[in-house]
Image (tube, rainbow, N blue to C red):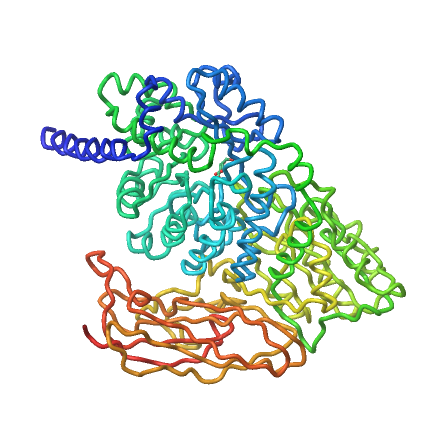
Amino acid sequence: MKPIRIFLSAIMMVSILSVSVFAAQTQDRQIRLLLQRMTLEEKIGQLTQYSYGMDLTGPAGEPIKPEEEIRKGRIGSLLNATGAEKTRELQTIAVEESRLGIPLLFGLDVIHGYRTIFPIPLGEAASWDLSAIEQSARIAAIEASAAGVNWTFAPMVDIARDPRWGRIMEGAGEDPYLGAEVARARVRGFQGNDLGRSDTILACAKHFAAYGAAQAGRDYSTVDISRRTLHEIYLPPFKAAAEAGAGTFMNAFNELNGIPCTGNRYLVREVLKKRWGFDGFVVSDWDSIKEMIVHGFAEDGRHAAELAMHAGCDMDMMSAAYIAHMADLVRQGKVPPAQIDEAVTRILSVKKRVGLFKDPYQYCSPERERELLLNDKHQAIARDVARKSIVLLKNENGTLPLDRDLKRIALIGPLADNQTDPLGSWSAKGEDKDIITLRRGIMDAVSSNTEVLFARGCDIDGEGTQDMAEAVRVACKADVIIAALGESKNMSGEAHCRGDIGLPGRQLELLQKLQATGKPVVLVLMNGRPLTLVWPSQNIPAILETWLLGTQTGPAIADVLFGKVNPSGKLPVTFPYALGQVPIFYNHKMTGRPGVKGQAYRSTYADIPVEPLYPFGFGLSYTQFSYSPIRLNRAKVAYDEIANVSTTVTNTGSRQGAEVVQLYIRDLKASVTRPVKELKGFSKIDLKPGESRKVTFALTAEDLAFYNQTMTKVTEPGKFEVFVGGNSRDVLKAEFTLLSK
Ligand code: BGC
């Protein structure tokens, strides 16, 4: 026992020293003085967050009277309180009726829009258009901040390699490089250049960390991954968010290699706060402090509070463990007062950055709320972002775009005239009635001579077939059939995982019946995750992946269907051939026996291919692009030199279009095996018919770095392959040698 106790107290000493340094080093006099005036109970109040109202995503806990608690200084932040007037009312209690008048933070899950709902984040990531993604977050911030919200629990930057996991819809897909770029863009969009302005909101990078690696794709499930995979795959988007200045981080629900993230001092204190120098604060996830008891890590609520505080969790969302036990833990010597001071200093400093000490009411403006929510400008931007998010998966014989003068179009399917599901999960204050459906969008886009026939065909889920015969009858009358199929908004998102990722219910059967009519069929998919689509990919001439596009669903899809806009999205995540391939991702390792068709004792399946149906980065256009052979500035690159990789891309078709030019590398031999491909750059370029553009990527030693056997980040000299192309599969290749230092 003894040595262990000595070891523990040594850790405690280090932690006491480093945290007291944090609080003492605060240059801010106002915060130092405030801290001096606070009682222990008031300090713990700042570390406490409750939900206002009933937007619950977890256990509700003991009911409290928030107004009374605010008055007593026992709450530092609320989530789910919205509206300029309501938040002003609550803020007034905090500022005028609590002893120290410390303003509240108001948090909400503003994930893809506040009232104007943008595409689900996975869809937006498919645009590979960082300024569009930033703009979407900017509009979300403008609307939310006008309605009293000054903190969003976004961006979710969890890498997801398993499409069963429902929260795959909430992130940027499977790749750490793309994920990091998108994380930066979203933080910039929410926080702007100056977090103190009244139209910016505090970002929260979540869920720290590796939540997307849940075993079996089941939400909240165990995560057990190597430290290398953690650092190379799951952490880069978080690091990018911290570098971009994200003011807060959220703990993940899951355990990571045996230690729940909320009690994981390596993750929070060592990596985030020490190595990355993060000076914002960390909030737990909903009740995740107390859930450490269920994990089998904490004895009871008191122990859970102690573990979370030691690990660096500054604010308790909804478990009420801090408010119940922390004062006692401090008095008993279990938690050093310096840890509390650190947490409070972090929270107060962020409140100051948000501008709350200057003007606590700056976010509560009923006029701005009335003027800004869902206004025309925001609608127009949402439409633009939505059409940029659409991915053309197949287009045989130029089926698309459709002629807007067609005589009759049959629009079939449970998502065709759907006024609910296109909002997607986590749609904040988005309202069904704001959605412009696909049916409406198409009717507005076609000529006055075109008849748009409609039939639902079947439900999204379930076994009912009563509408199917009618749908086929309607389809037979048309020149072309548009089938709008996919998932409901509740089939993805938190706690909405699927064990089968095919088209749910009887939708595939409906599609097969429509195809059997012999009419051309365009499949418009609306869904929150990759689906298995083998039959459609082999039998339907045109397929559009539209995700769940939000308020402007109909106009955006119609823009693409009728060629007003040329699709330019690319998959941010692999679409598997079959569920049995999952988890599947493009940046896998080689193995000693890579799959070779027809050869025995290889890394293959007996019944399905090894290759995915649609690879990462894939997406077609109504035009075509050609790539000139890769040019390297030199074949042998000195260690501290830059390797320039260039190609000239030409639009060889007859329409203007945008192409996402992607750069991948492979380190051919290293002291630790490296992935077969790693994305290291991309550039989205717009080209007129016949136009060419040279695209150059600069690779530095840092881009070629990885963690070696001792987990030190190194770049090892040797041969590297570089690949350039319009997706991760169809690429041109070249090679260079990196010379020793
Ligand atoms: C989710 C978080 C979310 C929180 C507050 C939790 O269930 O995991 O992502 O921010 O609820 O709504």
In percent of the image, x 28 and y 39: which residue is there? Answer: 269
Indicate whether 216 appears above or below 360: below
| Front residue of 196 and 741 | 196
Q: How many marks?
A: 0
- Choose top left, top right, bottom left or bottom right for residue 16: top left
In percent of the image, x 50 and y 62: which residue is there? Answer: 574
For residue 25, side relative to residue 656 (left or right): left
In percent of the image, x 39 and y 28: which residue is there? Answer: 290
Task: Determine the residue located farthest toward the left in the rendered image.
Answer: 2
| Front residue of 153 and 720 | 153
Indicate whether 205 appears above or below 105: below
Indicate whether 187 appears above or below 145: below
Q: Position of residue 292 (x, y in %)?
A: 36, 31
| Front residue of 592 and 728 | 728
Q: Position of residue 692 (x, y in %)?
A: 55, 81
For residue 733, side relative to residue 471 (left or right): left
Q: Position of residue 374 (x, y in %)?
A: 68, 44
Q: Position of residue 159 (x, y in %)?
A: 43, 53
Query: Split into 4 quadrants, where in the image is the C terminus?
Result: bottom left
Query: Split into 4 quadrants, where in the image is the N terminus?
Result: top left
| Front residue of 420 and 72 | 72
